[in-house]
Amino acid sequence: MTGSPTKAGDAILTVDDIVVRYDTPEGPITAVDNVSFKVRPGEFLSVIGPSGCGKSTLFNVIGGLLSHHAGIVSVAGETISGPHQSIGMVFQEESTFPWRTVIDNVAFPLELVGMKRGKRAERARHFIKLVGLEGFENRYPGELSGGMRQRVSLARTLASEPKILLMDEPFAALDEQTRLLLGDKVLQIQQQLKQTTLLITHNITEAVQMSDRILVMTYRPGKTKRIVDIDLPRPRTSEIVTSDAFGHYVAQIWSDLREEASRGMKDEEAHVLHHDVPAS
Amino acid sequence: MIGAAALRRSSPGRFIAPAVGFAAIAGAFALGEVLVQIGVIDRYIVPPPSEVIASFYRIVAEERVFTRFLYTAGECLIAGVLLTLFGIAGGVLMHRFKLLQQAIETWVAALAAAPLVLMYPLFLVIFGRSMWTMVIMGFVSGLPPVILKTIEGIAATREVLINVGRSFKLSASQQFWKILFPAALPTIFVGVRLGLIFALINIVGTEFLINFGGLGHLIADLAERYDLAGTYAAICFVILVSILFFIALEKAERWLRPAD
């Protein structure tokens, strides 16, 4: 069940031999080590790994927010060095603009390209409807729940019509039920738009529910441990989490991750002991 | 779903706090009246509150208090515009050029705590007994909080919002106008509000000291005539103006920041 390699020619996103090192007071740390993979057009690929495996670092490298790395990121064959209009990012932290209404948040990227007010309001309404927030156009983010705010962020990114949707644990701060339902919504949108999506997550259920393939990373330094093909029927909904096949994939990925997560836990304990940090 | 704020607004309990506030003021007046009437407080130092209240009509009808109020308000408005423009621009420049910030931020913070009203002889020499002496006094005293709060507001912009801007490939100018400035606006407004209050205090104080201008001048006039009841009535009027000024600023802030 190990994942199939993707031919160089048919990839829309190529991540090639990425290495990221940081200098710390304890010496240099390799956060990401020789990570390579390709994403096909319309594919949903998740990158999963324990805390500290360099997932978010990889997110920043692919999104162009981190420049001090070795290796190449290319979109449709074009090497990129910095943020690229083809990649739309959805962040883990709440990232709506609190001073803008929902419709003005979603219209933000359209405003940047100089689209006329009427046209951009129409386009923004389309994406607001897509994420299921019609009726909330004139509300401010402060009046919405955490899940609704993340949907606003998603709609804003989709409004820029990126070729690749790059998401970093967008539902991490939400409760499990909201997370499953929002997973349904993302899946529905992804199928509808045939949106190439790269999801960074530490949640196995979320990854299996949504992905065509899952890249499992090792604990520090973050390397590719395995790529798993998820051969579950589409269209999928959160109901799939009760199926035997789903449980099988979850168990398989957890067996890969457990060893890495244990290593991470031991490493953190050693760090606390070494620095004599009092237990909270 | 009814929000907590809506419940608070619709609750009859919202009238209790202002009622207690007014009752406390009325109680203080009544206590003052009794203490003066029984001779505990000398009426030649503090007039009875009833005389002060009775003097209100006199300072309105005979002392042109509203004309003087408009004069002081005009000075505050000019000082307010100047300190908003220069304060925000100064804060932005100091945030942009770290060396500048490191070099002078401490001095600006020290100025915010200094009794700047003592600088009035300098401005009196430069501008003479004119409204510009008061305007510049208000401007100088209100400038430091606007600068400091502008720096604080921009520096406190959440990293993720800056990253959203970067992900949409915003230019430096777009990043400032579309993200940094609106994100910092609530904090900047706190600085402007503080600056305007400092300006009002110093403008009225300078009017009093140089015996020229609006409400401060009126208080100085009445005090020189030893019209104690009128003096206290004018002081009460200034306090009333300060309260209304503060409420107006709060309303303006809510209007400018509907998201909060």
Image (cartoon, coloured by chain):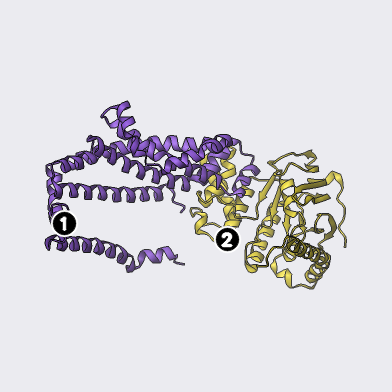
Chain colours: A yellow, B purple
In the picture provided, is B16 more to the left or to the right than B53?
right
Observer-nearest of B257 and B37: B37
Q: Is residue B215 above or below residue A29?
A: above
Front disc: 2 or 1:
1
Chain bearing tag 2 is: A
Q: Is residue B167 above or below residue B26?
A: above
Q: Is residue B242 above or below residue B100?
A: below
Chain bearing tag 1 is: B
Observer-nearest of A173 and B49: B49
User: Do the CB atoms of the residues marked 2 and 1 lie less than 8 Å apart?
Assistant: no
Residue B160 is situated, as x and y percent measured from the top left of the image, at 62, 49
Observer-nearest of B77 and B13: B77
Badge 2 element: helix
In the picture provided, is B59 more to the left or to the right than B244?
left
Q: Which residue is mark 1?
A: B49
Residue A107 is situated, as x and y percent measured from the top left of the image, at 56, 46
Q: Residue at x 69, y 44 (%)?
A: A65
Q: Residue at x 43, y 43 (%)?
A: B145
Residue B47 sits in quarter: bottom left
Whether residue B196 is visible: yes
Badge 1 element: helix
Q: Residue at x 27, y 64 (%)?
A: B19
Label 2 environment density (alpha carbons within 10 Å; few <14, some 14–19, many ≥20): some
Residue B96 is situated, as x and y percent measured from the top left of the image, at 56, 36
Residue A191 is situated, as x and y percent measured from the top left of the image, at 71, 56
Q: In the rendering, which numbered label is found on residue A146?
A: 2
Q: Amino acid at mark 2?
A: Gly
